[in-house]
Image (cartoon, rainbow, N blue to C red):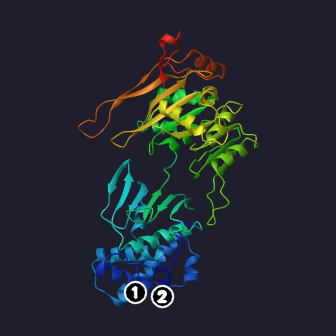
Amino acid sequence: MSLRARIHTPEENGAHGRGGAGEDGHLVASFRAKLLEEIDLTEMSALHAAERRARLERVLGHIISREGPVLSTTERAQLIRRVVDEALGLGVLEPLLEDASITEIMVNGPDQIYIERAGRVELLPLRFASQEQLMQTIERIVSTVNRRVDESNPMVDARLPSGERVNVIIPPLSLTGPTLTIRRFPRSYTLHEMIGLGSMDEQMLFLLAGLVQAKFNVIVSGATGTGKTTLLNALSGLIPEGERIITIEDSAELQLQQSHVIRLESRPPNIEGRGAVTIRDLVRNSLRMRPDRIVVGEVRGGETLDMLQAMSTGHDGSLATVHANSAEDALMRLQTLASMAEVKVPFEALRDQINSAVDVLVQLTRHPDGTRRVTEIAILASSGRERYLLATVSRFHAQPLAADGRVYGEFVHHPLPRRVAERLYMAGQPLPQAFGVAADDGQLAVREAK
């Protein structure tokens, strides 16, 4: 069932389900009640969403023509839209969900609705009629995935059947009132399309393609909203067709096009607090499934240790993302997350594990103008229990924010470590001309990550 598939009776909508405040809200509620009196709910439930909406609009048009009031064409269309949106269950959120340019909807209580569009967040001149109406909308949304939200269960994080990821947190945990966040996953992009968006240049594409096909282990790092999953999806598209790929995610976002893909998704506990299946459970299980590659949507806990062990014991070419603000931070975060496993491993041993498992770090940044770019590709040049050494091979040098509100800059490339160039050569991957090979470590842009 899709996010907008349910029809609600007046009893379900309750006394607070007004489409707006004051007389306008009462008008919407009145016509919604009349509409639901005249339709056959059984017949409506058999229709597709678009057919259901068209039928409701047609019936409501007849009711308004028959009973009034007299409205202009624009007012009539607006009233029909609002009543049908309320009947279908999501009210003011309905047109937002239909707008493909909106990637995130953020409801901060009944009076504030923000959206993200083209990387920018904006406040909309929309509001719910009351906190009760917002709670009803939230309850309808979470009911589509057989979840409930109430004082005993005030947080819900779920993926809806229609693909959106929903997070809900309500009072007493949220002091600003019921808070709803709906994240719509962007369509998948190829690396060539990302060049067109300015996220990277052609030489970076050639290098990343070679690294993935030569089975380097790659960690994609970045803050929230920098496009980690988008890049991970694009990189995974470079994996050869014949390989068995297992993807592991909290919310299934990856859209791999290869034929031999096993998709695994974690499961939260049920209402009684039982039945949870964690990312760590899935990573461990995937090792028994004969994977050629393991792709982890995001590591955020003890599963990091299992992933690192898999990367360093025969599962080369694996990919994962981690939340971090720089390549150095990514290494420290991996070390911290791996230490959260129930097996207590000394930090020196974890450093050894990371040095042997991670080959490449790709850092993403979201700039003030909303653009997302690969701002660094770094090779992990240390080994054993040495302090982490990062050799930068690509970096985006940003200029200050321009008068037109855009961030400009240039991609700069540095020589590759010899061992990386040799591994690419042995895998039959061409060496991008912009990089070259360092004659010795003195030519590398190496820094120590502390």
Indicate the secondary structure of the residue bearing disc 2: helix
* Residue 189 visible within the image: no
Q: Residue at x 44, y 65 (%)?
A: 172
The disc placed on residue 63 is: 1
Q: Residue at x 61, y 45 (%)?
A: 256
Where does the image place residue 69, in percent across and percent down from the top left? 30, 86
Where does the image place residue 63, in percent across and percent down from the top left? 40, 86
Label 1 with label 2: CB-CB less than 8 Å: yes
CA gap between label 1 and label 2 equals 9 Å
The disc placed on residue 268 is: none
Residue denoted by label 2: 38
Q: Residue at x 48, y 33 (%)?
A: 329
Indicate the secondary structure of the residue bearing disc 1: helix
Q: Residue furthest bottom?
A: 67
Answer with the quarter of the image where residue 216 lies: top right
Answer with the quarter of the image where residue 113 lies: bottom left
